[in-house]
Image (cartoon, rainbow, N blue to C red):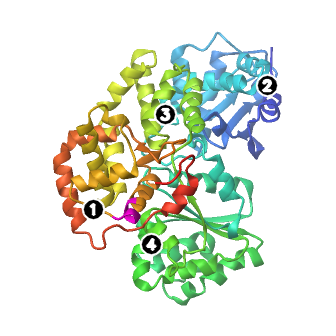
């Protein structure tokens, strides 16, 4: 029985909550609708083309020859769009059923075919979750799990590959406190991904929005930053900047012209802002003063992302970042977000995992998105090679053999901490070894930190200990245990102590102590204050 493609697409939008971001287009006998398949949480686009062809419209059956003849034209159309694949909605029964080699041929051209049998199952599904699973099934069949996997370690995530962070998105998009935002967090925690997702959502929701993206590591002067912003927002005058340097001084006026004269909103996204502060601190924060003046307009917003230097600047009264933006301290995903990141995409890829596997991954990663991606990628790799998901013990064995996992845990720890923070961690690991038992599950208090440091020849004040614990919590290195009368902590990444022992703990302590003793000023308050951390903790009384 023939299913009208247009009616089916309307069903997806109206009944199954698949968003539509563009109006339909027609031409050459084709009708093209653009649907947002990122909701499936697969490697899918917000503007996935759903294509129907008038020459076969109304036919209850089509042949494989008819299907094959249209492939070259569909493949060419796929190359012309930015989406990773297109969906060909035929609405008819295909006779005979396409053989595996033909399915692979279409898949290699990034074309998925939906026939009337798929449409019937989607329409008959009792709920949205079932309908999405039925829709995802043929997409996986044609493209394969590797192409559709949302787990791509090392790459910033957005769209279908972005998970959780709903509270952060709502707070950032609400425009409170002047509308300017600074996303703060350690490396690999997902700052760039959140910036990308914010930009994507704002662009989709506002057709009058002008945006600019700036990467701090590529900028070495105020001119570099302003030129990048102007090339996106005001290309009409950006080309004059090399010969008319005063344009930089008038940046606030050039930006405010967009909402005041052209009725356009403005959003600028500045990633890796620590690099900007490196040179800007040497010029009395001239750039930050300029940016602050440029984004005082209600319809102009700026979003920063950074780590230590930015955190420090926001806490200091003598910098323009103080009271300029609302701070969002980015932590790992919560339990629900982490479980959803694991189970939903894997299920739609056709991989049913036992309940014990997401629990294990949550315990090993503490919700750090980059680590969750590594674990889930390993599950897919194992499934592809063995036809079934791994048991929890097998998954751990495979991960411990993977150098990417070691790098993500140990190397990121080294890069995210200063000498004092590393020293207290190494000293605690040494203390855990001495105490016996499992070092992976070692629990400690502020007092234990003090004792451990004294054993390696370091004596800190109570204020310094509070600062260290606050920094390590914000950096995602340690995590507080809720519901304890006395504050108690654990290592947020269970494998970190073991990796440090394997690296030679004595050597690490020796070299880190040398670094610590040669650092001027001792402990620096670079992250959240101990008071801010304490306000976010639950269930403890005193140190």
Per the model, the C-alpha gap separating discs 2 and 3 is 49 Å
The N terminus - image quarter: top right
SS label for mark 1: loop
Compare marks 1 and 2 and give the one earlier in the sequence.
2
Q: CA distance from mark 3 to mark 4?
A: 35 Å
Of residue 325 and residue 221, the one placed in the foreground of this image is 325
Q: Nearer the viewer, mark 2 or mark 4?
A: 4
Which residue lies under the disc numbered 3?
362
Asked where in the image residue 198 lies, by quadrant, the reply is bottom right
- Compared with 68, 436 (above or below) is below
Could you tell me which residue is drawn at 71 percent across and 34 percent down?
Answer: 51
Q: Whole-Å distance between the Cαs marked 4 and 1? A: 35 Å
Q: Is residue 87 magenta?
A: no
Q: Nearer the viewer, mark 3 or mark 4?
A: 3
Among numbered discs 2 and 3, the one appearing first in the sequence = 2
Asked whether disc 2 touches disc 4, contact meaning CB atoms under 8 Å apart, the reply is: no
Nearer-the-camera pick, 266 or 451? 451
**Residue position marked by numbered label 1 in the rendering:** 459
- Image marks 1 and 2: residues in contact by CB distance under 8 Å: no
Label 2 crowd bin: few (<14), some (14–19), many (20+), radius 10 Å:
some
**Helix, strand or loop status at disc 2:** loop
Residue receiving disc 4: 276
């Amino acid at each position: 029985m023939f299913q009208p493609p247009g009616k089916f697409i309307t069903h997806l939008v109206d009944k199954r909550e698949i968003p539509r971001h563009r109006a339909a287009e027609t031409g050459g006998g084709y009708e093209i609708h653009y649907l947002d398949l990122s909701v499936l949480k697969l490697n899918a686009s917000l503007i996935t083309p759903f294509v129907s062809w008038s020459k076969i419209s109304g036919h209850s059956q089509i042949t494989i020859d008819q299907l094959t003849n249209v492939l070259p034209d569909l493949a060419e159309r796929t190359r012309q769009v930015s989406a990773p694949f297109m969906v060909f909605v035929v609405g008819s029964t295909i006779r005979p059923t396409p053989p595996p080699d033909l399915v692979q041929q279409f898949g290699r051209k990034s074309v998925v075919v939906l026939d009337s049998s798929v449409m019937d199952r989607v329409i008959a599904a009792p709920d949205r979750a079932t309908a999405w699973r039925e829709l995802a099934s043929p997409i996986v069949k044609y493209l394969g799990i590797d192409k559709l996997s949302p787990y791509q370690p090392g790459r910033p995530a957005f769209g279908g590959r972005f998970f959780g962070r709903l509270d952060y998105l709502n707070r950032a998009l609400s425009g409170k406190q002047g509308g300017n935002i600074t996303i703060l967090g350690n490396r690999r925690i997902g700052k760039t991904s959140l910036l990308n997702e914010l930009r994507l959502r704002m662009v989709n929701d506002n057709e009058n929005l002008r945006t600019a993206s700036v990467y701090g590591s590529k900028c070495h002067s105020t001119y570099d930053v302003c030129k990048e912003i102007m090339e996106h927002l005001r290309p009409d005058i950006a080309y004059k900047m090399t010969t008319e340097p005063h344009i930089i001084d008038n940046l606030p006026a050039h930006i405010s012209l967009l909402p005041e004269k052209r009725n356009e909103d403005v959003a600028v996204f500045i990633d890796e802002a620590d690099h900007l502060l490196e040179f800007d601190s040497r010029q009395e924060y001239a750039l930050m003063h300029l940016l602050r003046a440029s984004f005082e307009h209600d319809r102009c917003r700026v979003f920063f992302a950074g780590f230590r230097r930015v955190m420090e600047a926001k806490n200091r009264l003598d910098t323009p970042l103080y009271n300029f933006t609302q701070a969002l301290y980015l932590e790992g995903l919560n339990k629900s977000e982490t479980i959803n990141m694991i189970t939903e995409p894997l299920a739609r890829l056709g991989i049913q995992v036992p309940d014990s596997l997401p629990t294990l991954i949550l315990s090993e990663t503490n919700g750090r998105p980059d680590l969750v991606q590594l674990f889930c990628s390993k599950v897919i790799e194992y499934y592809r090679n063995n036809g079934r998901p791994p048991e929890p013990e097998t998954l751990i064995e495979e991960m411990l053999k993977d150098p990417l996992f070691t790098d993500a845990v140990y190397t990121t720890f080294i890069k995210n901490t200063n000498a004092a923070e590393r020293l207290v961690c190494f000293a605690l690991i040494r203390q855990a070894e001495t105490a016996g038992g499992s070092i992976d599950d070692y629990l400690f208090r502020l007092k234990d930190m003090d004792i451990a440091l004294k054993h390696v020849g370091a004596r800190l004040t109570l204020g310094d200990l509070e600062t260290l614990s606050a920094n390590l919590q914000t950096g995602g290195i340690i995590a507080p245990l809720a519901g304890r009368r006395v504050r108690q902590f654990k290592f947020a990444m269970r494998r970190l102590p073991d990796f440090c022992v394997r690296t030679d703990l004595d050597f690490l302590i020796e070299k880190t102590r040398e670094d610590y003793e040669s650092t001027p000023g001792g402990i620096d308050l670079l992250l959240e204050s101990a008071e801010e951390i304490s306000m976010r903790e639950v269930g403890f009384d005193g140190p």
